Image: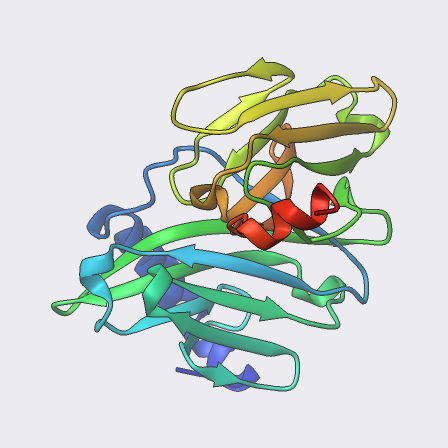
């Protein structure tokens, strides 16, 4: 639902009370951390909103506290697209040509049986020099191979905790090296000045998905695509051996 400026004047008090009730009556995302997404002025960003695979047929939307509006999935406007990907149990929100006026609180929500479930919420901060940024918001690597992501942070975040996290389950890796039998090896090195580098080795197909770099509460999203390894044929072996 959209509201014009005249509606906002009369509605402001009612909305403030509605927000208080909302925080009490809906089930919020269980990550428990405050996320501040920092984007460069005039730039764009794609935000993933994961949901329970059992909720594929439910209505889903992206909501802005600035405009008091709910944008449902599979809607495309000049500077906003909200697209559902039921095969991945998520919908993506792409915001383009961002400016200071877009700074504010946003959240992803799913309607279930007349109730609203907030699956993810964040504060979007538009800056001329983002507190946290990445070289590329989309990276790829081959199965069994490696991929590297460089994340930049401003001076004010020099001493904040640096992390590489997966959106879906909010599992995070910190500076150092982590090896597990289920996942790729992840190594994070901080230059101590303005950037840290994430190196993922031994990539698995299951590593494909959405991640984010963070320093303190400031973060920036990155999408990783792992390309399936091509089976080695007899012909390929013969070519390698010059047979």
**In the image, farthest residue toward the front:** 243
The correct choice, above or below, for 4 with respect to 196 in the image is below
Q: Is residue 3 visible?
A: no
Image coordinates of residue 216 in percent, x first then y, are 63, 28
**In the image, farthest residue toward the top:** 176
**Residue 151 vs residue 86: left or right?**
right
Image coordinates of residue 20 in percent, x first then y, are 32, 51
Q: Is residue 92 visible?
A: yes
177, 77: nearer the viewer: 177
Q: Residue at x 51, y 29 (%)?
A: 184
**Residue 243 vs residue 9: left or right?**
right
Q: Residue at x 52, y 67 (%)?
A: 93
How are the residues colored? rainbow
Image coordinates of residue 242 in percent, x first then y, are 75, 46
Q: Quadrant of the N terminus?
A: bottom left
**In the image, farthest residue toward the left:** 113
129, 75: nearer the viewer: 75
22, 175: nearer the viewer: 175
Q: Residue at x 35, y 67 (%)?
A: 14
**Residue 59 vs residue 154: left or right?**
left
Q: Residue at x 25, y 54 (%)?
A: 52
Q: Quadrant of residue 180?
A: top left
Image coordinates of residue 218 in percent, x first then y, are 65, 38
């Amino acid at each position: 639902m959209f509201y014009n400026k005249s509606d906002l004047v009369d509605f402001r008090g009612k909305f403030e009370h509605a927000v208080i009730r909302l925080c009490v009556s809906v089930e919020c995302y269980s990550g428990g951390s405050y996320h501040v997404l920092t984007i460069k002025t005039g730039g764009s960003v794609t935000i993933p909103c994961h949901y329970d695979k059992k909720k594929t047929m439910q209505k889903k939307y992206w909501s802005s506290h600035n405009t008091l509006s709910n944008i449902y999935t599979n809607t495309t406007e000049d500077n906003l697209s909200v697209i559902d990907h039921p095969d991945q149990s998520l919908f993506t929100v792409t915001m383009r040509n961002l400016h200071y006026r877009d700074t504010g609180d946003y959240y992803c929500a799913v309607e279930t049986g007349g109730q609203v479930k907030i699956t993810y919420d964040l504060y979007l901060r538009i800056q001329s020099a983002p507190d946290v940024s990445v070289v590329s918001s989309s990276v790829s690597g081959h199965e069994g191979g490696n991929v590297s992501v460089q994340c930049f942070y401003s001076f004010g975040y020099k001493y904040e905790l640096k992390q590489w996290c997966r959106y879906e389950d909010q599992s995070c890796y910190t500076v150092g090296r982590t090896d597990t039998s289920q996942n790729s090896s992840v190594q994070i090195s901080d230059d101590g000045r303005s950037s840290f580098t994430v190196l993922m080795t031994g990539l698995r197909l299951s590593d494909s998905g959405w991640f984010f770099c963070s320093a303190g509460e400031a973060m920036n999203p990155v999408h990783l695509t792992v390309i399936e390894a091509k089976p080695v044929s007899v012909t390929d072996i013969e070519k390698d051996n010059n047979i």
